[in-house]
Amino acid sequence: MASKKNYHMSPQQLNENGQLLLNWLENYYTNIEKYPVMSKVSPGSVRAALPSEPPQQGEGFQEILKDIDRVILPGITHWQSPNFFAYFPANASGPAILGDLLSAGLGVQGMMWVTSPACTELETHVLDWLVDMLDLPGKFKSSHNGGGVIQDTASSASLCALLAARERITNYGANREGCNGKLVVYTSTQGHLSIEKAVKIAGLGNQNLRLVPVDKNSAMVPEALTNLISDDKKRGKIPCFVAATTGTTSSTAFDPLDKIGPICQKENVWLHVDAAMAGTAALCPEFRFIHNGIEYADSYCFNPHKWMFTNFDCDCFYVADRKVLIKTLSILPEYLKNKATESGAVIDYRDWHIPLGRRFRSLKLWFVIRHYGIEGLQFHVRKHVEMARELVSWIEQDHRFELAAPAPLNLVCFRHKAGDAFNEKLVERLNQSGKIFLTHTRLNGSYVIRFCIGQTHTERHHVEKAWQLIGETAERIQDELS
Ligand code: PLP
């Protein structure tokens, strides 16, 4: 007879331990400002604090929790700190955390409609809601020819868009030889690295990636795109894919979609719009200028996991023609055949992205939208933009600093007038202080400090204190140098 012994955590223990973990999280969020924002550990120190062998016998949950404090916390860079102004945010919120917990608890693998109908249908529904919430073109809705799907990241979304563009032009799945070495991809010099990576993964060849010049505000120059396309055609190349950016990583520049769109349409080139961070701003009607010309897009993506209070990972990817995406990514082996799929009446999201398996990610998005409501989301996005505008005004009033780019939303790019080396030192000192975390970029060849305001719990006083700290630290460095 099989032994009844088991090592599992019972539902009751799950509840008890879950309470401990939720208490831990309450404590973490309450005290988050006490930790240095950027982790100070040196390489290898987290591993050095871990036993070299895994435990032979299982351990109590309390023991595991102790090691979260002892080993893990020191090695955490606190992305959820209100003093985190680095990169673009990856903001989390209570409803999203709980939605993710529920997703883990249900443990659904939603690769096809039949493997959990709610996993597919909630996702379709919430992504359709978002089309209205951001005022995106109706063609991206599942009730039209398009539809949306949650991908892990914008990088994956852009890769899928590129693969679909190749399929549309070459019927690649059936004819791999078709256009080998001829397809060309265009993005601006400010386009995200994920486009170059997509070209690499798709095997199109780096020599077939064109970086289109930008204007003084870092936006793609449409005439330059036209010229590059025309040159490529003369050389027997086949223009295939334009990745325009709505809110570039370095400085939230907006490529002029209303001018790029007609070029793509005329040349039969797929237009993908990457709005990874900035897309969330379109929740507010006054920021919808960021999507001017979006009606030309064949595909579009934005990341609720950046600025829409939905913890990582969650990218919403839309296509205007779902058939071509499905044709690109679908393979149906015998072991996945089922009546629902055969009926044609359901969506099987496994055909909309690269992995087969998928989590129930729409739960966290649904929880977020229901918790905040459109009004609450708009309120917080507006608040971030207002704080950024105030920071801009402080920079403009300070003779030591200058703005390095327009700040249309929540990212402020600026520098101290004392030059690159000084700014580099300034960022290093600020980050070492543990009080705030900032990152940098280069614009027009110069080192620039990026200050992005998108953290869930960032308030005006955090930004004000950070600005004070920047001024004081700059003063100290200047004293040392003089
Ligand atoms: N596109 C833009 C404009 C970005 O700023 C980023 C990341 O910051 C990405 C794409 C990549 O995002 P992900 O990490 O979701 O791939």
Image (cartoon, grey):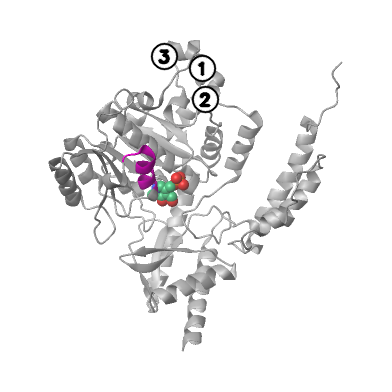
Quadrant that contains the N terminus = top right
Q: As rendered, which of 237 and 13 lies closer to the eye? A: 237
Instruction: Give, as a single range, the part of the protein colored magenta.
Output: 194-204
Q: Hey, which quadrant is residue 422 in on the image?
A: bottom left
Calculate the distance from the C-alpha at mark 3 to the C-alpha at mark 2.
16 Å
On screen, residue 24 versus residue 202, left or right, reads right
Calculate the distance from the C-alpha at mark 1 to the C-alpha at mark 2.
10 Å
**Residue at the spot 45% in from the left edge and 18% down from the top edge:** 332
Q: Is residue 310 visible?
A: yes
Q: Secondary structure at mark 2?
A: loop
Q: Position of residue 226 (x, y in %)?
A: 16, 46
* Chief SS of the magenta region: helix
Read off the residue under disc 3: 344
Read off the residue under disc 2: 111
**Residues tagged 1 and 2 counted as in contact (Cβ below 8 A):** yes
Q: Is mark 2 within 8 Å of ligand 1?
A: no
The crowding category of the residue bearing disc 2, from other C-alpha atoms within 10 Å (few below 14, some 14 to 19, many at least 20), is many
Mark 1 or mark 2: name the one nearer the start of the chain.
Answer: 2
Q: Amino acid at mark 1?
A: Leu
Q: Nearer the viewer, mark 1 or mark 2?
A: 1
Q: Quick check: 454 above or below 397? A: above
Q: Which mark is residue 336?
A: 1
Q: Position of residue 41 (x, y in %)?
A: 64, 62
Q: Is residue 425 a member of the stretch shown in magenta?
A: no
Mark 3 or mark 2: name the one nearer the start of the chain.
Answer: 2
